[in-house]
Amino acid sequence: MNEEPVFMLDIPDGITRPGAAPLEGTATRRTAPHRPQAQRSADSRRVASLAARLWSLPAYFLRTERNLPASVAWCPKATDTPKSSSCANPASAEFMIPFFPLYAFSFLFRLRLGEEKKGSRHIINTMKYHKILLLPSWINAIAAGMILMCAGLSPAAFGAGGPMRPIASETILAESPNPQDVSLYTPGIIRLDSGRLVASYTETNRKLKRGHTVILTSDDKGVTWQRRAESPTNQGRLFAAGGKTYYIATMFYISPGSNPNGAPLCIQRSADNGGTWSEPSALDDRTWHQSAANVWHANGCVYMVWERLTVNNIKGWYVGALAPVLMRARETDDLTKAAAWTHASEITFQDLIPGYKENNLETDYFGIPFYPQSFPNATPLHGKVKFPPIGWLETNVVQITDPNHYWHDPKGRTFHLFARAHTGRTNYGALARVVENSDGSMTTSLQTVPSGKKMLFVPIPGGHMRFHIEYDAKTKLYWLLGTQSTDSMTRIEKMPEGRYSRPDNERTRMVLHFSKNMIDWCFAGVVAIGPEDKASRHYACMAIDGDDLVMVSRSGDSRAQNAHNGNLVTFHRVVNFRELVY
């Protein structure tokens, strides 16, 4: 495996820094959590400033003497992780230690020759101010650098400049036997109380129009996986309840609407922590749609959302005809029985916006829909690219836990549904709420804000694509794993050759955010970036594994059919994810 160093650096003040783009395919995220200046002590700020500048000296020397790029941090690809494609140990101090004396001596020698001006003088003045002995200068420089490195500090820990590094490892969990015909979809993952990880994905032969779901387990934190079961299901998710493990899905079909008999909902159960599985049991024979979205536990019950096709009046991708249905079951019941489940009332997207069916939607002032709508058909845009009527899909469910939140329900009977919004725009999601009534029924409606207006669209990073929400009770934060867009305003006819679908359909960047209120999101880091358009990292599912987050992604490489039809499922781990909070 090639180990090509990636460089990243903070150039001292007064030294010109030529532009340097990150290497293609390199995920970007700092290797240490963000730390606002206000949270640092005065001494910490001084050390951080001095350390960042000391670390910049070697890179300046390298750039000047070796004509290397002006972006710096030693970051070889991981070799100790099977099939790894991410940088596991950026800014290695072990790499820098042997060379630091030479770098420091070179810098101070240049200083005496007068080649370094404002930036270098600032370093010397800083050292003087903090009473660091300057004679002999090269000894102090080496000593300061060695102390910082021996303490385990790296330039990235102080926010040194350059591209951000990935926060997660990456290994391949599953691979297509024939990438051009067989694609892998809908990866899901949960962690059981025993510590075992259970994962699933669907393998689809698009040419033969058939496929199946694979269920696997790992007892060594995802290092190795054992194949446990296959089933004739599609677009499912795993969850645990009442000491049992379940997989709920639709019976297999190729694409929405392609099965004339619908997509009935079914469920399988394992009583031995995912070791063996029952045959699928039918729950509902109507047409349903979903992905591996989240599951919520409260009031002794398990809650999840599936979308039902309520009316078949859209030709093609029918997300405008879906109703997100909150489903509830008591955890101790037999969840393979249809009678165990209660369904909330339904609201269909196309009925919520006046003028939807007339293609004159009353949604002015924020550009939705972005492209013209041609209900009941898709609007031709460029070549084979079309724009189906707008809608929602792939819904997550949460409860608002903050008692000071506008939407908090002290009785614990209100649930909020956050769905992917197909609008042609990026970073909008869709919102609905469900209230449990005294008789046990559940009513779905739109959320009303203090002005009396209804709220259908909400800001969600990556809300235009499938996203996953996981609530962490320790931090009382909602964690969001989704897709980052970078060029949604590029005209379709100007998109790079080979780019999949519309500009708002970018699928290569998988990112992590957190929020205390489901509206205001803080960027936590980049999980992974595919090196090309076909190398997607998207449609991911995650679970909390102790102090870590584990994730599975619908992924691909250069062999994939396209960005949508990937040939890989990748496994990712973010270690000590709570340290990312700032």
Image (cartoon, rainbow, N blue to C red):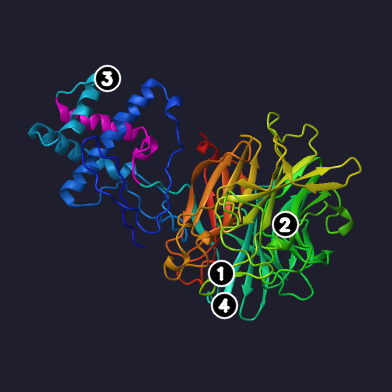
Look at mark 2 in the image and give the residue it sits on: 349
**What amino acid type is highlighted by mark number 4?**
Asp
Q: Quadrant of residue 218?
A: bottom right
Look at mark 1 in the image and give the residue it sits on: 565
**Would you say the residues marked 4 and 3 are in contact, meaning their CB atoms lie under 8 Å apart?**
no
Q: Within 10 angstroms of label 1, few (less than 14), some, or many (20 or more) residues? A: many
First of labels 3, 1 by sequence position = 3
Q: Which stretch did the figure color magenta?
A: 136-162
Compared across the picture, whether 124 is left or right of 42 comes to left
Residue 104 point in image, percent of width and height: 19, 36
State the predominant SS element of the stretch in magenta: helix
Residue drawn 62% across the image and 76% down it = 205
Visible residue check, residue 57: yes
First of labels 2, 3 by sequence position = 3
Residue 458 point in image, percent of width and height: 63, 46
- Foreground label between 3 and 1: 1
Quadrant occupied by the N terminus: bottom left
Separation of residues labelled 2 and 1 (CA atoms): 27 Å
- Foreground label between 4 and 2: 2
First of labels 4, 3 by sequence position = 3
First of labels 4, 2 by sequence position = 4
**SS at mark 1?**
loop
Q: Quadrant of residue 55?
A: top left
Residue drawn 83% across the image and 55% down it = 335
**SS at mark 4?**
loop
